[in-house]
Image (cartoon, rainbow, N blue to C red):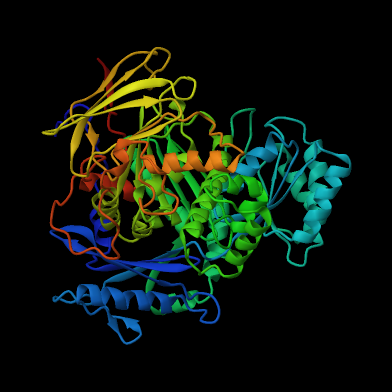
Amino acid sequence: MVYPSGHVVLRELTVEETASIPEHGALLVAEIGPDTTNVALIDLVDESYRLIARATSPSTFGPPDNDPTKAIIAAVQKIEQITARELLRGEDLAYPQDDAGNGVDGLVATTSAAGTLSVAVAGLSRHASVRSATHAARSTYTTLLETIALDEGGTQLGRHIAALAYLKPDVIVFAGGQEGGNVSANQRLAHIVGLLAQHSTQPPLVVFAGNSAAADQVRQHIGDGVSVEVMPNVLPLPGQPQLEPTRALLRRRYAEQIVSALPGAERLRMLRNERLGSVAEDQGLMVRFLAQRFNRNVLAVSTDSATTACLLASNNHYSEAIFGRLGTRFGALAVLEQRGSQGIQRWLPFELEAEDLAHRLLNRAIRPHQVATDLDDLLLDYALMREAIGIAYQALRDERKDAQFDLVIAGGSMVDAPRPGLAALALLDALQPTYRDSELAINLYLDQWSLLAASGALAHINTDAAVCLLEMDMLNNMPLATVIVPRGELAAGKKMAEVELTPLQGTPITRTVHAGEIVRLPLARGKRATLRIRPVGGIAIGQNQAGTEVLSDEAAIVGSALGVIIDARPRPLALPDDLQQRRQLLLRWMDALDALPPETAYAPTQTTNAAASATNGAAATEAQSEPKNGAGADPVGVVSSSDDVAALREGLVLQPQPKRGFFRRK
């Protein structure tokens, strides 16, 4: 057969491989979180797997229940009421699905609530091997207890060693030395690591990821009774990190030691659960698939009660920065410790003393299941999200300084925003994207139903269902905005650009953008438009020369909850110390994106952006009815073919499609 130029030819499955793929009808996917458990029902609709319904119940894996299945059963009972299907027989799932649509054919679970893997890092140089080993340690839900750098020496090194002696990590990642270099320093550090490990009541796993020539001496100095895994050097040459082998080992260790020990995990097996994985790993699988499938640079960010993650697949390279004790409830005090009270207070349009803030965060850690009870508490939630995501994003950027992204998927607590504008503003404040981060535009999405993790969990048992759920439901669920960040600096208030958005069969919308503003041009979901930007001299759009007018391809802009956002605020964002000035600035930004209801006490007296009063996209609902075939247009690309499913099954090896130009010069 002759294929047209550029066609991707994937290996056909053998008869034996095809026979080994399980046939499923209805499937349940359970995501067990620290606070809530989400359950989604997936089933075939016109030969495609679609999200049928979804329900949430408070998690029950901890005391007094110690049984995660109670929350799953409670959520399934809600789905039964929504769909009028019989999915349960008593306290068990009804297997298999019958001809009437009752029952299910499988259950798969994923969790971010199993706890953390405690890790310590030891290396020869603080700014080389320790830095690379720390990046590798962020590959799953870990708690980084301590770092030891031999080049610090003296009292400081002694303090780190003394602290580590009491902390008792699960794993010590030991790195240092370039390939072919001297091994004597590794031997000295191995002696220290060996003493720490030998005197622990439960010796940690030592992962040696340094100069391979020192591996035998390291084993000898650490001594018998301590398990040592030798991995490829995390920094074999300056500026050339090699992190993935160590990352993969830590993910496996987390699955074997932490996930499998989730309280009540044996009860999941009684429900015939086919797999229990971690949310971050399942999300990462689909982030890599999305990047390859659509030739996009994809950044996924999420934060919840206790965890925060930034996952980036960019330029054929995958990186992750995952924090196991950083969040808005259980992890709120960790945010305070790393950012300080001022880092959180700066995002609040009301006065909150440092002592009162600490008390509020302590109360959250003690009572993590409480939800925001008023607007102040809600805005505190999003202040914590900004800082938690900012911490993880900075860790990611420390590894990938020049990586770009043009598709951002936000999940976790971010999707609980009562208005899409609040989620978009918090996301932009946390990431503070610049013109360097993308060639021109950044698409924002809200993973409103937590389908990124659900599709990743499904991929391990049914790749067809995973791809359908990802492309036909998640990407169509909540496109949030198309964001453009101009390049150049002007004094606040100076005109930067004229922007014109022309919908198909609609009236053009024009805005004047001034330095320091964030401006919204509404474009409803299901609509398409052409965008023209006329920057003033000294201001550029994307990689174009300053002052060059740019015009999108015809109807290239796809409608979303907010439409188009022009973020002309300075980088880094600088908020005034004076409360009243900061309050007015924050309220102007919120008003520009319609982030708060107009009748709230925080609403400014005047509207600063005419676009702010436009109606947002559809609000979230707790369940989705059975979709009709072909409902909704895919804003990223066409629905996957069976070849793409095979590519996912073969480990996401897929040649990218050619990237289409978004803007052209006039």
Q: Is residue 52 left or right of residue 138?
A: left
Q: Quadrant of residue 357?
A: bottom right
Residue at 82% over, 62% down: 199
| 597 up-or-down from 8: above or below | below
The outermost residue toward the front is 605
220 vs 51, nearest the viewer: 51
Residue at 46% over, 51% down: 302
Counting from the top left corner in percent of width and height, residue 218 is at 76, 46
How many marks do you count on the picture? 0
62 vs 426, nearest the viewer: 426
Counting from the top left corner in percent of width and height, residue 520 is at 33, 36
Residue at 45% over, 57% down: 413
Q: Quadrant of the N terminus?
A: top left
The outermost residue toward the left is 505
Counting from the top left corner in percent of width and height, residue 151 is at 80, 36
Residue at 48% over, 77% down: 266
Counting from the top left corner in percent of width and height, residue 209 is at 65, 43
663 vs 44, nearest the viewer: 663
Q: Quadrant of residue 466?
A: bottom left
| 165 up-or-down from 504: above or below | below
Q: Is residue 293 left or right of residue 102?
A: right
| 329 up-or-down from 85: above or below | above
